[in-house]
Image (cartoon, rainbow, N blue to C red):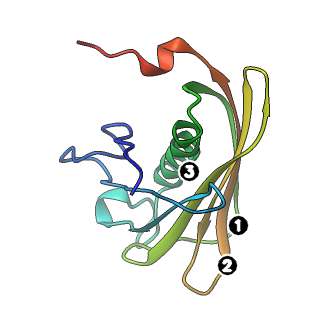
C-alpha cells in the first residue's frame, strides 16, 4: 500500500468519505479496487458522475504523490464511456504520463469487471508548495 492518506472526502477514514486506498505497481501506476455504495448514487442504481470524477482525480493525485511532486489540479477532463452500477467492484488506475517543469500530465481510468473502460480522465496538475500545507 502507498502511504497516501488522500483527502478526507475520497481517501482516509472519514465517515462520509470513500475510504479509497491505492497500491503502487512496479510500472508506477496506482491501482485500487472499489465498490461504490448507494451513498454515491445518481440515477437509480447508477453511480453519480461527480463520485466518478472525485475518484479519478484522487487516483491521479495519488500518482503525483508517489512521484514526489506536490501539485494541485488545474484542469480535469473526463470521458464517461459506460454506466457504473452501484455495488459493482471496479478497478481504478492513475499514473503520471509526462512531466514538463512544473506541469504534470496525468491519466486515470475506471474499469468494469468485464474489462470495459467506464470512465477515462486526463488532467493537468501544477506543482505548488500549497499542495502540502496543513490547516494546523
Quarter occupied by residue 61: top right
Relative to residue 42, is residue 83 depicted above or below? Answer: below
Please report the residue visible at 57 percent of the width from the left and 25 percent of the height from the top. 72
Quarter holding the C terminus?
top left
Question: Which residue in the structure is indicated by mark 3?
Answer: 56
* Residue 129: image location, x then y, percent: 52, 13
Return the mark for residue 81: 1
Label 1's element?
Answer: loop
* Sequence order check, earlier mark of 2 and 3: 3
Q: Which mark is residue 116?
A: 2
Please tell me which of labels 1 and 3 falls first in the chain. Answer: 3
Q: Nearer the viewer, mark 1 or mark 2?
A: 2
Number of the front mark, 1 or 3:
3
Marks 2 and 3, how far apart in space?
16 Å
Q: Which percent across, then down, holds residue 40?
A: 37, 58
Task: Judge left or right: residue 52 versus residue 20.
Answer: right
Q: Position of residue 53 (x, y in %)?
A: 55, 48
Mark 1 near mark 2, Cβ–Cβ under 8 Å?
A: yes
Image-quadrant location for residue 1: bottom left
Q: Residue at x 65, y 51 (%)?
A: 95
Q: Closer to the camera, 88 or 7?
A: 7
Amino acid at each position: 500500500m502507498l502511504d497516501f492518506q488522500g483527502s478526507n472526502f475520497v481517501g482516509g477514514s472519514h465517515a462520509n468519505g470513500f475510504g479509497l486506498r491505492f497500491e503502487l505497481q512496479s510500472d508506477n501506476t496506482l491501482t485500487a479496487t472499489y465498490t461504490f455504495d448507494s451513498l454515491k448514487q445518481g440515477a437509480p442504481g447508477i453511480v453519480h458522475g461527480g463520485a466518478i470524477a472525485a475518484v479519478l482525480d484522487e487516483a491521479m493525485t495519488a500518482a503525483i504523490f508517489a512521484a514526489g511532486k506536490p501539485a494541485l489540479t488545474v484542469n480535469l477532463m473526463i470521458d464517461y464511456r459506460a454506466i457504473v452500477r452501484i455495488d459493482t467492484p471496479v478497478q481504478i488506475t492513475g499514473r503520471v504520463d509526462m512531466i514538463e517543469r512544473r506541469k504534470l500530465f496525468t491519466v486515470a481510468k475506471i474499469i468494469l469487471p468485464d474489462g470495459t473502460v467506464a470512465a477515462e480522465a486526463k488532467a493537468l496538475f501544477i506543482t505548488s508548495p500549497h499542495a502540502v500545507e496543513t490547516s494546523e
